[in-house]
Amino acid sequence: MIESWFSRRGVGLQRGLKRAFDVSVSGAALGVLWPLLVGIGVAVRLESRGPAIFTQARSGLGGRTFTIYKFRTMAEGSEKGDVVVVAGDARVTRVGAFLRATSLDEVPQLLNILKGDMSVVGPRPTLPYQVEQYDDFERRRLEVLPGVTGWAQIHGRNSLPWPKRIELDVWYVDHWSLWLDARILARTIPVVLGSEGVYGERESFAMYGDRSGA
């Protein structure tokens, strides 16, 4: 019983440190990167009509719905069609292709982290209609805050078949620790620099209703 108490205290401490890390990193990054954010916003608006920031309802911790922020990478209204974005997709703008290749389109999610909707590390947040189709095993990925990067992200990102992504996300939930988060962050850098898995393969998601959740 005493051992169990110490175990719970240890997990609680780690979660508190994780949140402190999230707030510190997101706040500091927004303070440093705001000129870049403004420049990207201007570039997005200059190339195509529509807002610079794309917003969408996503499901987070426990299935709670929140609004995610990303730089718009496709022509306005394109997100209402096929949710799977493949290499060479005509809907992606030139600026958008660059943002996707460098993952700069994800930078506005620093606001989501600061608000507590997301964490730096965790499973990628998916669409509410996708969550409605989850079975009990898939719902386990909702037991932690969604993240900008995660265990599945460093193992193939959008190129992974949906069942494999779910498997990796649930593995992360079961094995989470601050050390694991540190490993994921370290491995995220070469994945981003190499533009690995930026686009999905349509056949990877066809049997699951094109549930990309990128």
Image: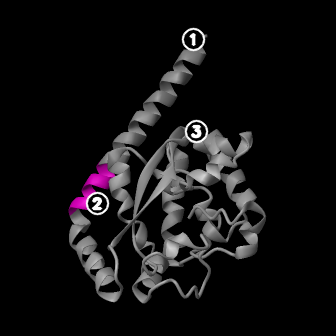
Q: Which residue is mark 3?
A: 143
Image height check: is 53 above or below 76?
above
User: How far separated are the C-alphas under marks 3 and 1?
Assistant: 25 Å
Observer-nearest residue: 206 or 20? 206
Residue 48 visible here: yes
Which amino acid does the dot numbered 1 rest on? Ile
Chain-order first, disc 2 or disc 1: 1
Q: Which residue is mark 1?
A: 2
Scheme of image coloration: one colour
Indicate the secondary structure of the residue bearing disc 3: helix
Which amino acid does the dot numbered 2 rest on? Ala
Q: Position of residue 61 (x, y in %)?
A: 51, 41
- Residue, far right: 207
Q: Is residue 152 left or right of residue 205?
A: left
In the picture, the quarter occupied by the N terminus is top right
Chain-order first, disc 3 or disc 1: 1
Chain-order first, disc 3 or disc 2: 2
Q: Of the residues tagged 3 and 2, which is closer to the observer? A: 3
Q: Residues within 10 Å of mark 1 (few under 14, many from 20)?
A: few
Which amino acid does the dot numbered 3 rest on? Glu
| Magenta segment boundaries in residue numbering | 24-31
Q: Which residue is mark 2?
A: 29
User: How far separated are the C-alphas under marks 3 and 2?
Assistant: 26 Å
Q: Is residue 192 left or right of residue 33?
A: right
Indicate the secondary structure of the residue bearing disc 2: helix
